[in-house]
Amino acid sequence: MTRTSRRRETARAEDVFAAKASRRGERGVALILVLWVLALLTVLAMSFAGSARTELKIARNEYEAARARAIADAGVTYGILGALDPSPQTHWNPDGERHEVAYGEGTLSVSVQDEGGKVDLNAGAPELLAGLLRAMGAADAAAQQVLDGILQRRRDAIAAGNGTLAFRDVAELRLVPGMTRPLYQALAPLVTVYNRNDRVDPLSAPPEVLRSLPGVSEAQVEAYLAARQQAGAQPTALPPLAGVDRFLAHSALQVVTIRSEAATPGGGRFLREAVVALSGTPPYRFLAWRQGESAGP
């Protein structure tokens, strides 16, 4: 074989090797591209699965919340029926006592509180308001500032005339000078705009209201609460709260606040608060219907 032939053979072999190397390189690039595509698809699949799990969890939570809301709303009816029940054995005393009820697959905790047992912001005696402010932890100066603000709103309402109320909703108490968030949260369950009386009904008054009565002793209040729990709403069976008669008056049940808290086996929770007028026509009507602040998912 001549030198020229050998060169040709060598060139041909180099060309073949280069072609094979090129094909191997192409296959390597293709393999890398495939691996990248597989990795991308894996990431997308995992992302989709995670998103689907999140959406499923959200849907499940919304479903449980809706179930809890429906059960809590049914609990309001339980409260109304219990408060209106004429039977002493099954009647619910409107003193805020909690009643545990099984409903469907969920559970209910329902209480009925007579608004007549609370201190009225528009009509309550100033001594009652002052005692309640101090009982809820307000210092003397702070309590006096808030009391002055409440009384000033009353004077402004009287000056305005035309039946203007100083407070149309308990939430307006937040606007009084000196009112703090912790003090408001403590006071809100104990005051009302529906009593329209300068006194409170001791048969249904919350314990905090009774303890805030000017001049009453802790021993008196504890004895009264124990007797009230035993006797129910029977005034003659209860010991007197000496020295505070001018702040007390028994009245017919007219307006109540019902708190109905529901829980489902799946973890749903909902708190419904309803203010209900139990007198007049129709037999009862709703004055307020709201979600309670303490409810959670």
Image (spheres, helix red, strand yellow):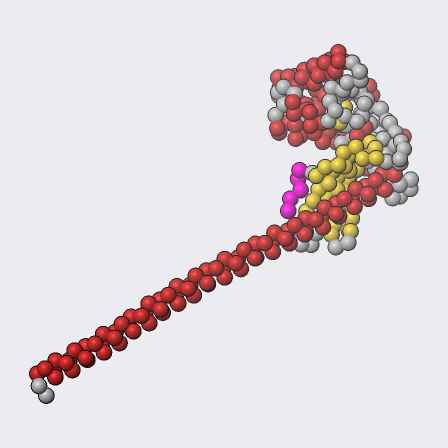
- Relative placement, left or right, of 176 versus 49 is right
Q: Is 295 included in the stretch rendered in magenta?
A: yes
Is residue 34 positioned above or below 294 on the image?
below
Residue 96 sits inside the magenta stretch: no
In which quadrant of the rendered view does residue 27 lie? bottom left
In this rendering, does residue 237 appear at all?
A: no
Point out residue 128 in the picture as x, y percentages from the top left corner: 74, 21
Percent across and percent down for residue 249 are: 84, 24
Find the magenta span and give its range: 293-297
Residue at 77% of width from left, 18% of height from top? 164
- The location of residue 102, given as percent across then percent down, is 77, 51
Secondary structure mainly formed by the magenta segment? loop
Residue 129 showing in the rendered view: yes
Q: Residue furthest left?
A: 3
Is 35 in front, or is 220?
35
- Left/right placement of residue 121 relative to residue 42 reads right
Nearest the viewer among 157 and 247 is 157
